[in-house]
Image (cartoon, rainbow, N blue to C red):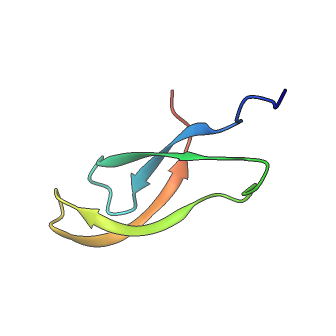
Amino acid sequence: MAKKNATIAVKMLSTAETGFFYVAHKNPRKKPEKFEFRKYDPVARKHVQFKETKIK
């Protein structure tokens, strides 16, 4: 029997200091480094860098 998938939810916080965030899922065994995405921030109304933080 296979182990349960070890994905965790991470908060992707905007670097534009607007407080907007996305929630993404990642497998820490396959991707141990922190996520960085360039996605749309509707508060800033432009594409900005989003960095991984912990969900409280």
Find residue 26 and report its horizontal and vertical position in percent.
61, 48
Q: Quadrant of residue 2?
A: top right
Along the line of sight, the residue nearer the viewer: 10 or 2: 2
The answer to whether residue 26 is left or right of residue 43 is right
The answer to whether residue 1 is left or right of residue 41 is right
Residue located at (80% from left, 30% from top): 3
Along the line of sight, the residue nearer the viewer: 34 or 30: 30
Q: Residue furthest right?
A: 1
Residue located at (41% from left, 51% from top): 13
Find residue 29 and report its horizontal and vertical position in percent.
79, 48
Residue located at (18% from left, 63% from top): 44
Q: How many marks?
A: 0
Along the line of sight, the residue nearer the viewer: 7 or 15: 7
Find residue 38 and report its horizontal and vertical position in percent.
40, 71
The answer to whether residue 53 is left or right of residue 13 is right
Task: Point out the image quarter for the N terminus.
Answer: top right
The answer to whether residue 50 is left or right of residue 48 is right
Q: Quadrant of residue 45?
A: bottom left
Q: Quadrant of residue 39?
A: bottom left
Along the line of sight, the residue nearer the viewer: 54 or 3: 3
Residue located at (45% from left, 51% from top): 12
Image: 22 above or below 48: above
